[in-house]
């Protein structure tokens, strides 16, 4: 029998999706499953985006430009300028989701066996993108005790080798919800300039910052024109996960032109999704005000309820819509599967994402889960009640 590739064998499973078969089986048995495992917002997609697709008059669904339409990129550049990010349309490549933007970035700046330093825990698919490109992830550990703040710069510097090509951050963070401060960004900027590295920032949750804190982009930092690469997406900003439209933004022309060759190889981003994404930029600011207020309320309810459970520790997020929760269990993978297969409270259960999959270091996150607060407040209260009852039963086995 022909064999699969070593690269394919090494591709990690998604901690977010690997338990889906167990959830689907529970639903077939009539069990209600509260999905806390995935960042699929229940917030409505802006009508202006949906109507742009419904009301369009295309009679040929043609290819777009490989870098995305000039109209969309120009409009997107205007959005960035509103957010104090000075770029133009020629600095932007539209991609099929933020995932493809990262894929293009890795392919453009790294060769097989090169290294990228990432604070962990980090978005699980970074492991998958790295494996697909033959790139080595070098983790630098952040901890729940510090709310997952940026590790000391000395920790990053100690990991830099001749193979190091970049530092990658997610700001605000998935899975931690941590928002890096301007000072922390400037520390990283100084480091990458000192060692001639790229600084990649995944900023898809830019709008979702709380408690009066403001997002500071790497693209706002002077002197990073050659080093900074921004990853972005419409998925979470406009609750348009299924559109699969993102972008890669850089003022480094060599990097941009290299990434464009990858874009040309896949021809073009999807036309209907481009139409919706361009229209979404007309969404009024009040949409985000209301959404942020809703997420703050959900975060507060979730954290308050979790803190009532003995043995549970939670890092309070100040951005995005996730948090890491430490549980009084030794194996959160086993616990998460047991929740779906064996535990029921009033014929209901919850689905969480085991946190070990968000780490690269072996053994870390084994007693943690990621929870996405993408459900309404009442459902979050019910979910935490289910978690509390489940922990009691699981630990009495």
Image (cartoon, grey):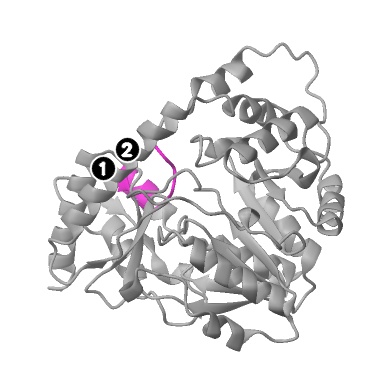
Residue at the disc numbered 1:
297
Query: Mark 2 falls on what kind of element?
Result: helix
How many other residues sit within 10 Å of disc 1, few (<14), some (14-19) or many (≥20)? some
The front one of 334 and 142 is 142
Q: Is residue 225 visible?
A: yes
Please indicate whether residue 386 sits to the left or right of residue 106 in the image: left
Where does the magenta region start and end? 23-42
User: In the structure shown, which secondary structural element does the residue marked by tag 1 occupy?
Assistant: helix
Quadrant into which the C terminus falls? bottom left
Coordinates of residue 167 in the picture (x, y in percent): 63, 71
Going by the image, does 197 lie left or right of 344? right
| Up-down relation of residue 92 to residue 45 (above or below) | below
- CB contact under 8 Å: marks 2 and 1: yes
| 3 or 69, nearer to the observer | 69
> Residue at 63% across / 76% down in the picture?
191
The question of residue 77 being in magenta is answered with no
Asked where in the image residue 227 lies, by quadrant, the reply is bottom right
Q: Is residue 125 above or below residue 40?
A: below
Dividing the picture into quarters, in which one does residue 395 lie?
bottom left
Nearer to us in this view, 179 or 30: 179
Q: Answer above or below: position of 172 versus 43.
A: below
Rendered position, 261 above or below 46: below
Q: Residue 384: percent from the left, percent from the top?
A: 20, 53
Query: Which residue, given by chain and number where applicable, does mark 2 sit on?
Result: 293
């Amino acid at each position: 029998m022909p064999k699969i590739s070593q690269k394919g064998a090494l591709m990690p499973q998604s901690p977010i999706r690997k338990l889906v078969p167990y959830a689907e089986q529970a639903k077939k048995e009539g069990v209600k499953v509260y999905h806390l495992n995935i960042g699929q917002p229940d917030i409505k997609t802006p009508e202006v985006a949906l109507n742009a697709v419904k009301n369009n008059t295309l009679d040929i669904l043609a290819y777009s430009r490989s870098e995305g339409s000039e109209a969309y990129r120009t409009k997107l550049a205007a959005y960035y300028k509103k957010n104090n990010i000075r770029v133009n349309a020629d600095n932007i490549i539209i991609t099929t989701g933020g995932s493809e933007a990262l894929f293009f970035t890795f392919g453009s700046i790294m060769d097989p066996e090169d290294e990228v330093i990432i604070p962990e825990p980090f978005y699980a698919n970074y492991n998958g993108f790295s494996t697909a490109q033959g790139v080595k992830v070098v983790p630098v550990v952040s901890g729940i005790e510090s709310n997952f703040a940026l590790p000391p710069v000395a920790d990053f510097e100690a990991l830099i080798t001749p193979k190091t090509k970049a530092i990658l951050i997610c700001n605000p963070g998935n899975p931690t919800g941590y928002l890096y401060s301007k000072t922390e960004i400037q520390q990283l900027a100084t480091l990458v300039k000192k060692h001639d590295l790229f600084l990649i920032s995944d900023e898809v949750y830019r709008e979702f910052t709380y408690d009066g804190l403001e997002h500071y982009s790497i693209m706002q930092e002077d002197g990073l024109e050659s080093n900074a690469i921004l990853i972005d997406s419409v998925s979470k900003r406009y609750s348009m996960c299924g559109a699969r439209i993102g972008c890669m933004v850089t003022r480094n022309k060599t990097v941009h032109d290299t990434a464009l060759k990858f874009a040309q190889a896949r021809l073009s981003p999807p036309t209907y999704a481009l139409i919706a994404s361009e229209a979404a930029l007309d969404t009024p600011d009040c949409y985000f005000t209301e959404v942020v207020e809703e997420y703050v309320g959900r975060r507060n309810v979730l954290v308050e309820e979790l803190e009532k459970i003995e043995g549970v520790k939670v890092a309070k997020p100040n951005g995005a819509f996730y948090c890491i929760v430490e549980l009084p269990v030794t194996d959160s993978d086993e616990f998460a599967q047991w929740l779906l297969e064996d535990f029921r409270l009033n014929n209901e259960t919850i689905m969480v994402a085991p946190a070990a999959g968000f780490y690269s270091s072996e053994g870390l996150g084994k007693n943690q889960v990621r929870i996405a607060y993408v459900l309404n407040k009442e459902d979050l209260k019910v979910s935490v009640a289910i978690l509390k009852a489940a922990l009691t039963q699981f630990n009495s086995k």
